[in-house]
Image: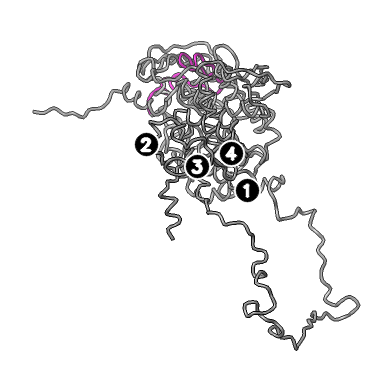
């Protein structure tokens, strides 16, 4: 007789499976514990980290605390204080509700909780390791809760192995810390790592909390938004048009006090700016949305960072309109209207004609005997008019081919197979004598199989990338001191990243020193970058590193070298001499992959002889 094969999982295994959804890294623990503290009504929340959260994540608050039985029950799966029936799922206004966070954390770490309610004389200490209760005892403790999460994933070596470097995990913790601290601006927060305090945030206004987290410079760029409607209330701040940047913009949405990601609504904000900002650039925004909890579903994602709205299209329009109204009010976008106190004095027509004179329509006079064909001899009938007059105003320049399709080069690059076996000098015709430049963007080079178009900026990016990549590997980039050192204010995330890649920044040729409090001074830049802004260049490299998710140093080197190359490469429209074109083409074909940029964009296209001949068949 065959045995049954389906059975119930032990609670410890079920908790570990749940932990895979809720606890992905130390930053996940920080997020869950901080949100619990906020829900507990805390006015002071301290976050203490050791070794990027690998060995310790500690969150201390002065909230309402828990009784002895509540403290024990909080580590059980599906234990929650916020849901009594299914209908409660659609009226939630607090952070955590799934009842799995503490159980999931305790399943993959060693957890110690010390908690006390203000009405109790003694508190409770509980120790749980791998879902197993090891101790529970009464202790003297301050009111509130103190969670210590030690040795995350100690019992799941495979998960622990996939944790990134200490600095990478710390960067992720800082990101989660900012998200919770930003919207809960009435609460005091602090963050410490390895015994050193990174930031302390006193209670403040929303605007001041933004400034405290992201630096004083952003204060002058903030435009207030505040609109109330029956569907949604929108309040917060957006950046002035001059704060737009290609990447690294600070963008935060909060729904009923909870951080969320929503690309659809982010497009509504950008849409409000219209043509005021360049296409493809982003602006910072810090927007808090208040919606009736019954109109949203917060249970579609384990970490609750994605939320489903009942009527997204209507909310999109309201968000776009509210941002546009604020931009217009602060003269950040052109407006066709007038302020109430600036209504122009438009004269009203006096239908009486002033001194009682009647208003009459204007009169038009014309010649009744005019004949347009009288006394005119057409040129083509042999009159006195010379035939040359037929071509007056016509340019004597020869017509040119419409080569507009090459403004955006095609994705497929046609490269003869001989290119992989022959050197660049053999592949190209001798001496490059017919080489020319087209519209300051492309270099035209006749080759054996046709005409090669080279995108000069992308070619320069490839050449510079290989140069900077080699300097990073050899760690010998020359540093050029600046005449006037420049100061730069960095956010907590940016300064954390800069500290983590300081050696790599130095190997690129930057000399950057910290003055404390997120302020740095640039004393040296890579040589050969005269005329470029050291601050802009450093920020470009820094944000490229922040976008890097992999921990491998080689991938980081790729990002840094590519960012440097893009910033330094020649721009479209720059006229090149023959020697400059020849030098650029020579260097391009000495690189390992001359047909593509480091990020995969097309550099060259060969228009074959057959393609050219087909243009003249008719």
Disc number placed over residue 288 in the picture, else none = 4
Determine contact: label 1, label 4, CB under 8 Å. no
Instruction: Where is residue 508? Give x, y as percent.
Output: 57, 20
Compare marks 4 and 2 and give the one earlier in the sequence. Answer: 4
Stretch of the chain drawn in magenta: 48-77
**Residue beneath disc 2:** 417
Eye-nearest disc, 4 or 2: 2
**Residue beneath disc 1:** 275
Residue neighbourhood size for the residue with mark 1, other residues' Cα within 10 Å, grouped as few (<14), some (14–19), many (≥20): few
How far apart are the two marked residues, 3 and 2, measured between alpha carbons? 17 Å
Horizontal relation, residue 238 to residue 80: left or right: right
Eye-nearest disc, 1 or 4: 1
Determine contact: label 3, label 2, CB under 8 Å. no
Instruction: Where is residue 489? Give x, y as percent.
Output: 66, 25
Compare marks 3 and 2 and give the one earlier in the sequence. Answer: 2
Residue 181 falls in image quadrant = top right
């Amino acid at each position: 007789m065959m045995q049954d094969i389906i059975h119930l999982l032990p609670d410890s295994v079920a908790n570990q499976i749940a932990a895979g959804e809720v606890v992905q890294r130390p930053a996940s623990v920080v997020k869950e514990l901080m949100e619990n503290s906020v829900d507990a009504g805390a006015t002071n929340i301290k976050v203490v980290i050791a070794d990027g959260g690998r060995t310790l994540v500690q969150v201390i608050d002065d909230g309402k605390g828990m009784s002895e039985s509540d403290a024990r029950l909080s580590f059980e799966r599906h234990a929650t204080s916020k849901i009594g029936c299914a209908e409660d799922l659609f009226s939630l206004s607090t952070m955590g509700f799934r009842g799995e966070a503490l159980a999931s954390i305790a399943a993959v770490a060693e957890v110690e909780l010390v908690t006390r309610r203000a009405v109790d004389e003694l508190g409770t200490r509980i120790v749980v390791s791998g879902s197993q209760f090891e101790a529970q005892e009464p202790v003297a403790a301050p009111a509130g809760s103190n969670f210590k999460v030690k040795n995350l994933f100690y019992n799941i070596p495979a998960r622990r192995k996939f944790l990134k470097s200490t600095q990478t995990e710390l960067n992720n913790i800082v990101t989660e810390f900012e998200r919770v601290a930003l919207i809960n601006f009435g609460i005091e927060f602090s963050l410490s790592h390895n015994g050193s305090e990174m930031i302390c945030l006193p209670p403040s206004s929303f605007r001041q909390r933004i400034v405290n987290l992201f630096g004083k410079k952003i204060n002058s760029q903030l435009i207030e938004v505040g609109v109330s409607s029956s569907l949604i209330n929108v309040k917060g701040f957006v950046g002035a048009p001059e704060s737009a940047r290609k990447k690294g913009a600070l963008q935060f949405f909060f729904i009923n006090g909870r951080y969320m990601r929503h690309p659809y609504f982010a497009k509504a904000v950008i849409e409000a700016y219209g043509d005021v900002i360049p296409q493809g650039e982003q602006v910072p925004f810090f927007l808090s949305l208040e919606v009736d909890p019954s109109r949203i579903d917060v249970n579609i994602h384990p970490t609750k960072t994605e939320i489903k709205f009942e009527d997204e299209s209507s909310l999109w329009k309201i968000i776009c309109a509210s941002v546009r109204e604020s931009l217009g009010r602060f003269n950040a976008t052109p407006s066709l209207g007038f302020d109430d106190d600036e209504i122009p004095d438009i004269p009203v027509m006096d239908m009486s004609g002033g001194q009682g004179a009647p208003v009459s329509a204007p009169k038009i006079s014309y010649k009744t005997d005019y004949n347009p064909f009288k006394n005119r001899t057409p040129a083509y009938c042999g009159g006195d008019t010379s035939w040359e007059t037929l071509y007056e105003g016509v340019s004597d320049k020869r017509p040119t081919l419409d080569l507009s399709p090459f403004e955006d080069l095609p994705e497929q690059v046609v490269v003869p197979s001989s290119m992989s076996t022959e050197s660049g000098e053999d592949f190209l015709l001798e001496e490059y004598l017919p080489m020319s430049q087209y519209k300051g963007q492309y270099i035209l080079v006749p080759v054996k199989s046709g005409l090669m178009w080279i995108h000069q900026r992308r070619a320069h990016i490839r050449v510079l990338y290989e140069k900077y990549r080699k300097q990073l590997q050899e760690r010998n980039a020359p540093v050029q001191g600046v005449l006037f050192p420049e100061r730069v204010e960095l956010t907590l995330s940016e300064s954390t990243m800069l500290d983590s890649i300081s050696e790599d920044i130095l190997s690129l040729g930057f000399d950057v020193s910290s003055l404390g409090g997120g302020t740095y001074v640039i004393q040296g830049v890579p040589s050969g970058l005269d005329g470029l802004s050291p601050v802009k260049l450093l920020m470009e490299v820094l944000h490229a590193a922040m976008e890097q998710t992999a921990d491998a140093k080689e991938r980081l080197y790729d990002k840094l070298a590519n960012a440097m190359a893009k910033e330094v490469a020649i721009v479209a429209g720059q006229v090149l001499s023959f020697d400059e074109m020849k030098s650029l083409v020579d260097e391009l074909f000495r690189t390992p992959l001359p047909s593509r940029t480091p990020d995969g964009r097309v550099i060259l296209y060969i228009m074959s002889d057959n393609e050219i001949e087909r243009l003249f068949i008719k």
